[in-house]
Amino acid sequence: MSLESSPDILIHVDRLLPQIRRRLDETHDRIRDVVFDTVFADYSIKKVFKNADIQYSTMCGAVVKNILNALQEPYDDINLMAIGNVDLPGFITPLVHGLIKRAHKYAETWIRSQGHLGLGYDISAQGYKPAREMALKNWNRYYGFADYTVESDPQDGSTPEETPSIDENLMSVLSENSTITPGGMHAISVMCTAFNKIAEEKGLKKRYIYPDNSFETWKAIARNSTTKDPGKFNQIRTEQKDRLHLTPEKVHEFYDANDTEGVDDTWYITPVGNPSGTAMSDTQLTATCEAIIARNPNATIILDCVYVRTLETGTAKKLMSGVLSSPEIMKRVVFIESLSKTHGIPGLRLGMFFSSNKELYDSIQNFDMTGYVCHSHELSALMMAFMENPEDTEKAFKELHRFWGRERKGLFNFLIKSGRFTDLFDKDQSHIIPEQIDDPLGLYLFVKIKPGVTRMQIYSQTGCIGVPTKMDTGMYMRFSVGQIKEPTYAKYL
Ligand SMILES: Cc1ncc(COP(=O)(O)O)c(C=O)c1O
């Protein structure tokens, strides 16, 4: 990974270098240890990045590399893998730049075709219908939407007797009930606000339930959306044997201990995980959702699928099949999708939410519309450019996922399998199973740390700058390979 030297980084380098030189004159400690210790203990950096450990680790790692460079010490083996960002490898950047150009053309064509309203608000507030259709058609390769039907709701204003529900193709229902958003996190945020309000209107207490493997941003968004009343936030312990994901047993345990009277439940599930770096099995996901609705038929489930399309198409289809084929589950689920990671464009902010349950979808959409009026035309244009003609583009994106997959597996071999760091990492890494480390699967490797080992020991000995993450089963460190641009850990395959 190259040396990043922006002014924001260099300011700390200039400030800390004299202090480190002085310390080195006084000690026989390893130069690298002194540099790591001084930078990570620095109060000025800590203060700025309070409560933002990912950014803090990334900044400190960059400062360490620059200081080692100034001291003429090797730094090539230090890789910043804390932030879940993406910096695309060279083989795919021409394609991505070409698609962005194509998006500008789409935006122009659309605006012209709309006459004087072209630059006005998107009155549907859902994003262009053709863009949503293109996305779902593209994603059909991973979900298999076209293989399923759902019962449509009776039309507004008519009774169920007059308008019997009919089976409709799932894809056309989802294209109606979908909204293009500036990223998946926006969708999560709107959902939480909507769900809080719905509960309040019904006179119910809102309850959020989620596994300890949920990404920190989810926890922050849910908490920021409402007050911290007792019992509102429920984090469930997950086990390594379950690959750090929920199971039906955990759902039953929760409902055995907690009543459903007077509450409105929302579960948040990430079937392919950040931070866990693992995926649920298809039966695990289906049985978990079944258990939720068996114990509380009114619960809603946010299914955060932003990493599902990093899997191979067959693996993804199998994973999602139980949910998509169950009308009962589908009635309670809202899906979150995003191109941030699958297409390496987190800064373009492009995502979507959708549900086959029109009432549920409408309630969220209404909040999005009233709070934001609509989202930019540019997002729909981007969606069209990235999603059309998968036969021309998707092979390259799959190659990107496989590139990350090789880096993840190589990193696992380097850190764990090599046996070089047995003093740092726990012997039990049983949440990581061979078939999931052999497949492309998200961008993360999540390894369990031995009790008492510090992040500084790991950074200094392995050169891998990850983020320490506390789970109910112990401390782990999450590494993200999304900023690796050239084969690096793949050499350990
Ligand atoms: C689990 C999970 N959900 C959702 C998102 C949403 O990403 P974005 O808002 O960039 O679409 C992320 C991004 O890191 C994620 O890790």
Image (spheres, rainbow, N blue to C red):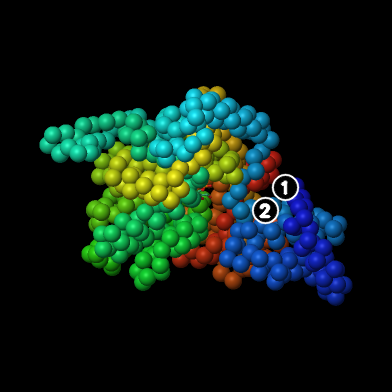
Q: Point out the tag, 1 or 2, that comes first from the N-terminus.
A: 1
Question: Which amino acid lies under the numbered mark 1 shown in the image of this protein?
Answer: Met
| Secondary structure at numbered mark 1 | loop
Q: Are marks 1 and 2 in contact (CB under 8 Å)?
A: yes
Identified at 19% across, 35% down, the residue is 165
In the depicted structure, whether residue 366 falls above or below residue 226: above
Question: Which amino acid lies under the numbered mark 2 shown in the image of this protein?
Answer: Leu
Q: Farthest residue toward the bottom?
A: 26
Task: Pick whichever, 283 or 290, lies toward us.
Answer: 290
Numbered circle sitting on residue 80: 2
In the depicted structure, whether residue 400 falls above or below residue 462: above
Q: Position of residue 386 (x, y in %)?
A: 54, 32
Q: Where is residue 469 in the image (x, y as percent from the top left)?
A: 54, 62
Numbered circle sitting on residue 1: 1
Identified at 59% across, 62% down, the residue is 52
* Classed neighbour count for the residue bearing mark 2: other residues with Cα under 10 Å, few (<14), some (14–19), many (≥20): many
Identified at 72% across, 47% down, the residue is 1
Identified at 29% across, 38% down, the residue is 325
How many numbered marks have been drawn onto this rendered protein structure?
2
